[in-house]
């Protein structure tokens, strides 16, 4: 008889990989924190980290960009998915509004991203680090 291979991962394996099997976070229970080392962007950028598991390479957060902020061309050791929640994000001339989405490979330089009126986004990073590397970054150069 051929052994069956389950299509659904073993829950004990999943729990070990994610740190725990289930997590909730309420945005109103988290304070905005100045970004110092989460993204290495600084200059008024703030974050609310919903979930972070460095061993699994997972970080999910809200990011608030002040009006007029320009996120420089950068790279990081993770890919990311971003959904605009408030305001406008401009990526290479493309205007993204609430509900719009952008994905970027971490190792490939991308940006700049512009926030003329300020913006709040949900970002999900998958990889070794969400820290942005760019010219003059405390996390290193591209």
Image (cartoon, rainbow, N blue to C red):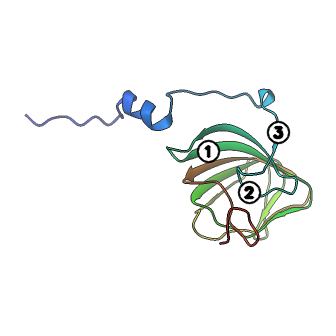
**Is 4 in front, or is 76?**
76
Above or below for 141 versus 15: below
Could you say whether the residue bearing mark 2 is in a helix, strand or loop?
Answer: loop
Could you say whether the residue bearing mark 1 is in a helix, strand or loop?
Answer: strand
Q: Residues within 10 Å of mark 2 (few under 14, many from 20)?
A: some
User: Label 1 near label 3: C-beta < 8 Å?
Assistant: no
**Is 54 in front, or is 119?**
54
**Residue 95 is drawn in which quadrant?**
bottom right
Name the quarter where the C terminus is drawn.
Answer: bottom right
Task: Name the residue located 90 percent from the left edge and 60 percent from the top edge.
Answer: 116
In the visual, does 114 lie left or right of 82?
Answer: right
Above or below for 105 versus 98: below
Numbered mark located on residue 59 in the image: 1
Could you say whether the residue bearing mark 3 is in a helix, strand or loop?
Answer: loop
Q: Which of marks 1 and 2 is in front?
A: 2
Q: Distance between the residues labelled 2 and 3?
A: 15 Å
In the visual, does 15 lie left or right of 127?
Answer: left
Q: Nearer the viewer, mark 2 or mark 3?
A: 2
Numbered mark located on residue 32 in the image: 3
Q: Earlier in the sequence, mark 2 or mark 3?
A: 3
**Is 84 in front, or is 48?**
48
Q: How crowded is mark 1: few (under 14 residues within 10 Å), some or many (20 or more)?
A: many
Q: Earlier in the sequence, mark 1 or mark 2?
A: 2
Q: Distance between the residues labelled 3 and 1?
A: 16 Å
Q: Position of residue 67 (x, y in %)?
A: 92, 56
Task: Name the residue located 51 percent from the left edge and 29 percent from the top edge.
Answer: 20
Q: Which of marks 3 and 1 is nearer the N terminus?
A: 3
Q: Mark 2 points at which residue?
A: 40
Q: How crowded is mark 3: few (under 14 residues within 10 Å), some or many (20 or more)?
A: some
Task: Name the residue located 38 percent from the left edge and 28 percent from the top edge.
Answer: 12
């Amino acid at each position: 008889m051929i052994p069956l291979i389950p299509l659904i991962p073993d829950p004990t394996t999943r729990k070990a990989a994610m740190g725990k099997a289930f997590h909730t976070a309420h945005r109103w229970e988290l304070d905005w924190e100045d970004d110092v080392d989460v993204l290495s962007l600084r200059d008024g950028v703030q974050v609310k980290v919903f979930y972070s598991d460095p061993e699994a390479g997972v970080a999910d957060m809200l990011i608030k960009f002040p009006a007029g902020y320009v996120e420089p061309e950068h790279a990081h050791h993770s890919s990311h998915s971003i959904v605009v929640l408030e305001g406008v994000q401009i990526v290479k001339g493309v205007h993204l509004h609430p509900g719009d989405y952008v994905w970027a490979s971490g190792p490939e330089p991308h940006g700049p991203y512009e926030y003329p009126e300020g913006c709040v986004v949900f970002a999900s990073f998958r990889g070794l680090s969400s820290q942005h590397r760019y010219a003059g970054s405390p996390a290193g150069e591209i």
